[in-house]
């Protein structure tokens, strides 16, 4: 996989830009539900991260984008938003590198259910 030098922008096609926006919308919609739609959120994160990885985005770029989505969400209180960010970063690492913790091969390990309010 070819990586872009730090600070260099990449030229994306209209379709790639639209796909990325659609995937961010899926994540935002899952975060907007009360309680958070964890299943849709996880699928959205995995799909988004895989697409960004395939485009050459670094893990740091993807984590920043996911963090911005959580920060822009209605997830409250602040502690719940922090926990959501932590969980999404774990999912990001799983999706980007193929595994985290005990399960290898790209199959997500179980994460305890989240209790999040969107007030």
Image (tube, helix red, strand yellow):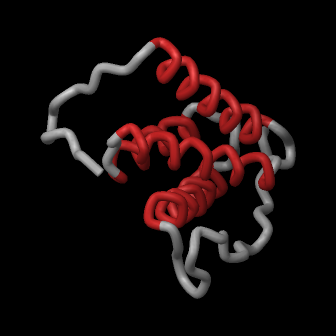
Residue 105 screen position, x and y as percent? 57, 74
Residue 118, above or below 98: above
The percent position of residue 17, horizontal first and vertical second, equals 48, 20
Quadrant of the rendered image containing residue 13: top left
Q: Is residue 59 above or below residue 91?
A: above
Left or right of 95, for residue 110: right
Q: Residue at x 69, y 54 (%)?
A: 42
Viewer-closest of 12 and 85: 12
Toward which corner of the image does residue 84 lie, by quadrant? bottom right
User: Left of 10 or right of it: where is 6?
Assistant: left
**Which residue in the rendered view is the most extreme toward the top?**
14
- Front residue of 16/58: it is 16
Identify the image quadrant of residue 52: top left
Name the one closer to the observer, 84 or 92.
92
Give percent across and percent down for residue 36: 80, 48
Task: Identify which residue is drawn at 59% across, 68% down.
Answer: 106
Residue at (54, 38) in percent of width and height: 71
């Amino acid at each position: 996989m070819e990586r872009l030098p730090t600070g260099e922008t990449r030229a994306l096609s209209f379709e790639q830009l639209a796909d990325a926006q659609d995937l961010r919308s899926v994540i935002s919609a899952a975060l907007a539900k009360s309680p958070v739609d964890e299943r849709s959120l996880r699928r959205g994160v995995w799909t988004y991260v895989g697409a960004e990885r395939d485009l050459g985005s670094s893990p740091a770029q993807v984590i920043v984008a996911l963090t911005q989505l959580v920060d822009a969400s209605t997830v409250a209180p602040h502690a719940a938003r922090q926990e959501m960010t932590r969980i999404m970063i774990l999912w990001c690492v799983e999706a980007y590198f193929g595994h985290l913790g005990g399960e290898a091969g790209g199959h997500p390990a179980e994460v305890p259910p989240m209790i999040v309010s969107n007030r």
